[in-house]
Amino acid sequence: MDSSTGHNSSDSPEHEQYYRLVPVSESRDKEEYKRLDFHELFRYFWNKRTLVYGCVGIFLTIGLVFAFFSSEEYTSSASVIPEYELQDRVNEVIESYGLLFGLTGSIRENRAPSYLLELYPYMINSVAFKHKLMHKSFEYAKRDTTVTLYQYFTEMYRPTFLHKFYHSIREPAIPDTTDSETEEPSRSAGNEHSWTGQSLDVPILNFRPGERKVINELSERITAGYQRQTGIVRVSANMPESDLAAEVVKLTLETLHEEASSYKTAKARLYKDFLQDQQRQARKELEEARRELTAFNGADSQPLNKRMELQSNYEISLDYYNTLTQQLKRMELTIQEQLPAFRLLDDITVPSKEVKPKRKLIVFLSILLGFFVAVSWITVLFLLSREKLPA
């Protein structure tokens, strides 16, 4: 039994097993090889120090180019603080006297006193606002003349190569879809929306290529924000000249006041136009009634009934005309009351120091980036060199 078992175990190749004894010193050498030797890494870095100098020098050169050849930018700003607005009397007037003209129902609006302030940033950031802004003239002290922002950015402003490159890769606020460079006139000169009865007249703006360019510039340079907690609206302008930055902030606030006044008094002006139409019609009726009464008084035959009828028509027309005149005067006063009041929290000042480019920060970041790229590159080369070594 023992001999057969020994024979099977020795003659069967399937059950043969081989063992290889590995020295303890060899296994430890492999484990140490897999570990990262920081002394070796430091020596490798020291040997490759010229690569560090080269990367830092290249990035420093690029940083210096950006720092000293980028266009200077100046920022000026102003803050508008909220005020308790006067009582909205426009709706009260319309509701009080609306029954005379067939207007029924309550049309009062419940809004917070500073609701209009929340709309200011949207007005400033709108394309129509910038289109109106760029065609407003202002005093340009450098040329001692009156120019517009459209003239400045199309005829006077000469951007640097870096500025042009940045705008070429940046998505514009208004994409230019025109194929030709011909200057076609705009189809609308502003953002005036008018209501006629139940219809709303909304213009369609069609800008010329030059106007699109200026609107894109203003969209990047003029910013406005509303702080909900404090109720402060802040307007700032970033321009290549210090005097121009303050002038653009002033021009923006003036245009904003015009747009806010137009928005705030739109309903009152609509009702005023309605009253003026009614007043003109009432004046015609009054003149007709006066003419008939005068002709009757000059006639030989003056029946009493006819005289009383003409006198009554004249008095009714006169009362109606006087009522409309009073309402119209009251509406004009109400429109003046409804004009938004602007209170500046801080005055507009001419900046004395540019905000861009930040040369020290650009140089520091370029050195840091060059050093990081060099360290990463050398580390990768070190790991690849260890992988190529024989086991």
Image (cartoon, grey):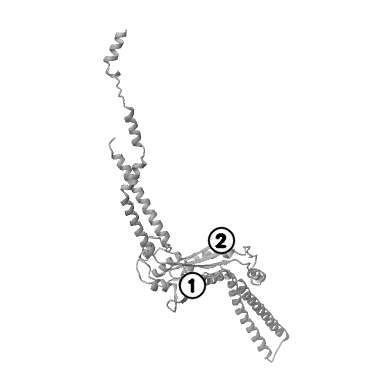
**Which numbered disc, 2 or 1, marks the residue that appears first in the sequence?**
2
Q: Which residue is drawn at 40% across and 56% down?
A: 365
Quick one: quadrant of the C terminus? top left
**Could one spot residue 272 in this view of the protein?**
yes
- Toward the viewer: 7 or 231? 7
The residue to which callout 2 is attached is: 227
Determine the secondary structure under disc 2: strand
Mark 2: few, some, or many residues within 10 Å (few <14, many ≥20)?
A: few
Residue pointed to by mark 1: 247
Residue 163 at least partly seen = no
For the point 30% across and 39% down, which residue is it? Answer: 387
Figure quadrant of residue 79: bottom right
Residue plotted at (61% across, 73% down): 335
Q: In this view, does 124 lie to the left or right of 15?
A: right
Secondary element at tag 1: helix
Q: Which amino acid does label 2 sit on?
A: Gln
Q: Where is residue 247 in the image (x, y as percent from the top left)?
A: 48, 72
Residue 44 in picture, x, y percent from top left = 32, 45
Instruction: Give the percent coordinates (x, y) of residue 41.
Output: 34, 43
